[in-house]
């Protein structure tokens, strides 16, 4: 009988893309970055909210200190949206588990292969509004990358449905506070979860490494993976050649797009590593009579908070908030997501979407919406011509 395979749910998205990646002894992912610290602090704060059934956020400065967060304003931003999503979708749920460790063995009927699966879903709950309630997996994704976590959530679902066998359906809810979005899955039956497990076992029979930007992004073995390094080396040479191509070679360039992303991410990692070493060294010679060093730059944006009003009144020679607002009117702008949040918080249940849409339609008619455009390369399923 083959040896059991140990996989954490968080690694499932990468394993489904590059099955042998679970075999490589990896280097732990650095979780000391500011985004990770903000995410840890926001999760800890939301645990208190859920455990104590709070309708407000706890003292975030305390959580910022505990988790080493320097940019407290970013923590407030993330935690506020985590709280908003929980209040909207969590009020109809009965919480069963909060950040508990789930473990279980999956057994392939045809080969006897065993997968020892484990994971820490943020929230496991049940619906309260149904005679036949579904199990609900609720997870916050607080990072800057809009990554696909479907297989991670399915792993959580399999483990949770084993702990509570009385449920026949499961719903997956993912809150993405940095994108002001909540992803809600269709309901999955136990048969659907069984089919997903069959697909997982089938994928794990593949022996070839499949490096790609999505597969390698969070893989703990990425730093030591020779297959990834070989792909980046060949991609670099290929991209240099393609930079001189005519537009008629567009399809070949499109086939190399994922490799370009891998090269770009490798350069970002190189920059990060070099800057850390340069900061420690102070400066380093380039060998041609010059040297490199780090120089910090900062930009400041005054905040229109209550404490700042007296200073602004005096500096600008105005009296009262209304006159200040009129003076700054042409210089103020508010992000669409923030305005949508404010409108949503002041809207009755079920009216949020309509109120936001109506507001922006009226603002657009009055020419009171500034539009900036940028071009992004996106991926979608290819359409077939009839």
Image (tube, grey):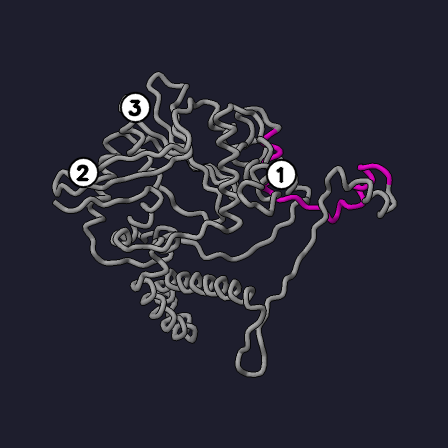
For disc 2, the neighbor class at 10 Å (few under 14, some 14 to 19, many from 20) is: some
Closer to viewer: mark 1 or mark 2: 2
Residue wearing tag 1: 339
Closer to the chain start, of discs 1 and 3, is: 3
Residue wearing tag 3: 167
Asked where in the image residue 64 lies, by quadrant, the reply is: top right
Location of the N terminus by quadrant is top left
Q: Which numbered marker is on residue 22?
A: none
Closer to the chain start, of discs 2 and 3, is: 2
Element carrying mark 1: helix
Question: Measured along the vertical axis of the image, is residue 382 above or below residue 338?
Answer: below
Part of the protein shown in magenta: 319-345
Residue wearing tag 2: 107
> Is residue 357 in sight in this rendering?
no
Element carrying mark 2: strand
Element carrying mark 3: loop
| Mark-to-mark CA distance, 1 and 2 | 50 Å
The image position of residue 114, as x and y in percent, is 19, 41
């Amino acid at each position: 009988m083959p040896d059991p395979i140990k996989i954490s749910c968080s690694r499932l998205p990468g394993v489904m893309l590059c099955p042998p990646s679970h075999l490589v002894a990896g280097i732990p992912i650095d979780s000391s970055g500011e985004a990770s610290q903000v995410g840890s602090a926001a999760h800890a704060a939301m645990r208190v909210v859920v455990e104590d059934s709070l309708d407000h956020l706890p003292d975030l400065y305390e959580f910022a200190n505990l988790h080493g967060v320097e940019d407290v304003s970013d923590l407030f931003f993330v935690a506020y949206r985590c709280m908003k999503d929980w209040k909207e979708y969590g009020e109809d749920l009965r919480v069963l588990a909060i950040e508990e460790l789930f473990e279980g063995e999956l057994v392939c009927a045809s080969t006897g292969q065993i997968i020892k699966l484990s994971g820490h879903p943020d929230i496991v709950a049940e619906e309260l509004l149904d005679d036949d309630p579904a199990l609900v997996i609720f997870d916050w994704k607080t990072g800057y990358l809009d990554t696909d976590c479907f297989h991670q959530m399915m792993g959580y679902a399999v483990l949770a449905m084993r702990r509570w066998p009385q449920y026949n359906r499961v719903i997956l809810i993912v809150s993405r506070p940095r994108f002001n979005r909540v992803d809600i899955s269709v309901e999955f039956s136990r048969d659907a979860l069984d089919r997903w497990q069959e697909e997982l076992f089938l994928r794990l029979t593949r022996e070839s490494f499949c490096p790609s930007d999505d597969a390698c992004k969070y893989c703990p073995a990425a730093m030591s993976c020779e297959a990834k390094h070989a792909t980046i080396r060949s991609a670099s040479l290929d991209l240099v050649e393609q930079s001189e191509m005519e537009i008629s070679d567009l399809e070949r360039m499109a086939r190399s797009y994922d490799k370009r992303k891998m090269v770009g991410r490798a350069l970002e990692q190189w920059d990060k590593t070099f800057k850390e070493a340069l900061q420690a060294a102070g400066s380093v010679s380039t060998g041609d009579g010059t040297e490199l060093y780090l120089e910090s730059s900062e930009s400041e944006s005054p905040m229109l908070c209550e404490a700042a009003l007296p200073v602004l009144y005096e500096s600008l020679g105005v009296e009262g908030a209304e006159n200040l607002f009129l003076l700054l009117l042409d210089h103020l702008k508010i992000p669409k997501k923030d305005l949508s949040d404010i409108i949503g918080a002041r809207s009755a249940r079920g009216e949020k979407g309509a109120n936001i849409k109506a507001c922006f339609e009226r603002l657009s008619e009055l020419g009171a919406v500034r539009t900036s455009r940028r071009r992004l390369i996106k991926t979608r399923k290819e359409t077939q011509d009839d």
